[in-house]
Image (cartoon, rainbow, N blue to C red):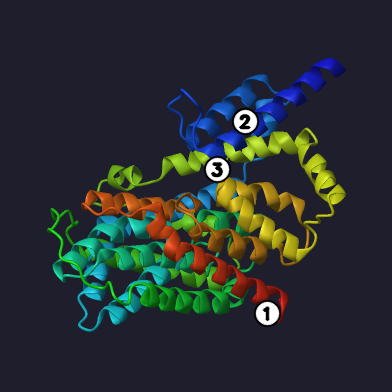
Amino acid sequence: MMTTIFLGKGLVYIIFILVYLGMIVGRFPSLALDRTGIVLLGTIILLIASPFPPEILFQAVDISTVMLLFGFMIISAQLRLGGFYTIITQRAANLEGPPQKLLAVVIIVSSALSALLSNDIICLAMTPVLGEICIKKGLNPLPFLLSLACAANIGSALTLIGNPQNMLIGQSLLLPFGPYMLFALIPVVVSLFVLWGIVCFLYRQHWHETLPLPQKVNLPFLGWQTAKGILVLSVVVVLFLFAPLPRDMVALGAAAILLTSRTMASRKALNLVDWQLIVLFIGLFIINGAFAKSGGLAAIEKGLHMAGISLQHGSWLFWISAILSNVVSNVPAVMLLLPLSKIPLAGPILALSSTFAGNLIVVGSIANIIVINGARDLGLAISWRDHARIGIPVTLTSLLISWIWIFAGGPLW
């Protein structure tokens, strides 16, 4: 019996290591597996062959986080199908004024929307519209598209619903919605100013460029569907701020209302749900849960302690989170670190550091990849050097700003 358990735990360790190596590399040699596929394969192996029965492994899934994520995907889908993202981008980008003013508007709009909705969805919806408008105006699209990605990442750190890792942190630690938003407000706003200043400086001689017009692919604007989505989202945010109701239940209720329609088929909204992300979440919950039950997390904590690193110290947690988020991506990093730190500010530390770190390199955030792929569809090439030119100084500055805010006089909880 002991031999069986030992071999089973060994399998858990092997799967855990292979999955996280796959998250780092993004694929396995000779296999057409992406990160979600790698996590799913590891999960299936554990469900079949680990020493823990499936019903025990499924207990590790934080279902409230999954439900919250799904609910907001439906809300985002409603607004996208209604053409809201298209019309708001068009109106913002068509404002008269110098390029610096347009850049400021793009940063404000994308960051504000990303604070309330998924930053990935915002980038997916805004990239083609913004790129097309820049080309029509004779503007170089690169500074605006790169600012869109960076601002969406920064803005999503403002709330506990702006991105998947913040949803996980908020639900796992039961963080209050309003107080967290007030805590994150200063580092987010200052970082957005820094982003604007860096882009204005780097592109001060390169605002204009003549490019061929792309094919128009904008969704039509549906006033009632957009109004319905905005109304439901507004009610959800008000309830989050002022009502002692479970956030996951509120989000699910909102999704149910939006799916109940006489004119828009539910399959259209469900087709826009990021099922891959949901599978990734569930799989990582199971893999990390099995690893913890096998003593793996305790072993990691002991190893870090022997190396003089304590995740019970806020600065260590902050910078390890920032680094790990660029190694394995922010969601897996947060899932791994959450159980290892019990300090009072662990939630805000992980939320700000993991989110701001996403601007460092292209693969640090899905939003970056979405913008670059969307630009390619418009015939625009954005290289990793183009991204790094803005991403590296913005990331290092925003991380430093948030570190100072947290550890040198931020507001008390």
Name above or below for residue 90 compared with residue 225. Answer: below
Residue for badge 1: 410
Residue for badge 3: 281
Give the SS element for disc 2. helix
Find out whether the residues at labels 2 and 1 contact each other: C-beta distance under 8 Å. no
Amino acid type indicated by mark 1 = Gly
Amino acid type indicated by mark 2 = Leu
**In the rendered picture of this protein, how many numbered marks are placed on residues?**
3
C-alpha gap between disc 2 and disc 1: 39 Å
Give the SS element for disc 3. helix
The reply, left or right, for residue 189 in relation to residue 295 is: left
Give the SS element for disc 1. loop
**Earlier along the polypeptide chain: callout 2 or callout 1?**
2
Please state the horizontal and vertical placement of residue 399, each as a whole percent of the image. 59, 68
Residue 59 appearing in the image: no
C-alpha gap between disc 3 and disc 2: 17 Å
- The label shown at residue 18 is 2
Label 3 packing within 10 angstroms: few (<14), some (14-19), many (20+): many
Amino acid type indicated by mark 3 = Phe
Tell me which residue sits at (28%, 67%) in the image: 227
Please state the horizontal and vertical placement of residue 74, each as a whole percent of the image. 38, 52
Mark 1 vs mark 3, foreground winner is 1
Which quarter of the picture shows residue 1? Answer: top right
Tell me which residue sits at (53%, 65%) in the image: 395
Q: Quick one: quadrant of the C terminus?
A: bottom right
